[in-house]
Amino acid sequence: MTDTEFQAVVDATLVQVEEYIESLVDTLDLDADSMRSGNVLTLDFEDKGKMILNSQVANHELWLAAKSGGFHYFLFNGEWVDTRSKVPFKTHFVELLTGQLGMACPAL
């Protein structure tokens, strides 16, 4: 995979996460702001902290910083997977978000 192809996959993922958070703002009355700067997406949940997603082009990874720690994901068969636990990103992100917000969040 070229760096350009990698960045396109990252961009699509960040857009998907932004749209997911926007849907939670509407359905769960969640107080959240998202800010995108290039391939860095910052999610601010007011008194519940922040989550930051960004791409690491050199190693072709997607990184997530959350209240509970830092996580790295790699592409495996077209899906982001945690480098340690091998849990898919979408599942892991919702688990981390649920823990950080203290409320159940629907699947991504």
Image (cartoon, grey):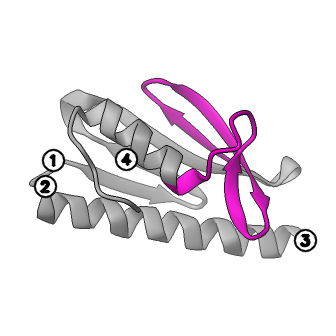
Quadrant (top left/top right/bottom left/bottom right) for the C terminus: bottom left
Residue 1 lies, with reference to residue 28, above or below; the image says below
Q: Which mark is residue 43?
A: 4
Q: Circle 2 is placed at which residue position?
A: 28
Q: Which mark is residue 31?
A: 1
| Residue type pointed to by label 4 | Leu
Q: Give how far apart the Cα atoms at labels 2 and 1 are.
A: 9 Å
Classify mark 4: residues with Cα within 10 Å, few (<14), some (14-19) or many (20+). Answer: many
| Residue type pointed to by label 1 | Asp
Q: Say whether marks 3 and 1 touch (CB < 8 Å).
A: no
Q: Which mark is residue 1?
A: 3
Image location (x, y in percent) of residue 89: 58, 52
Determine if the magenta segment contains residue 72: yes
- Residue sitting nearer the eye, 66 or 103: 103
Q: Say whether marks 2 and 4 touch (CB < 8 Å).
A: no
Q: Give how far apart the Cα atoms at labels 3 and 4 are.
A: 28 Å
Residue 67 lies left or right of residue 101; in this view the side is right
Which residue corresponds to the image point at 51% horizontal and 56% vertical from the top-left?
A: 90
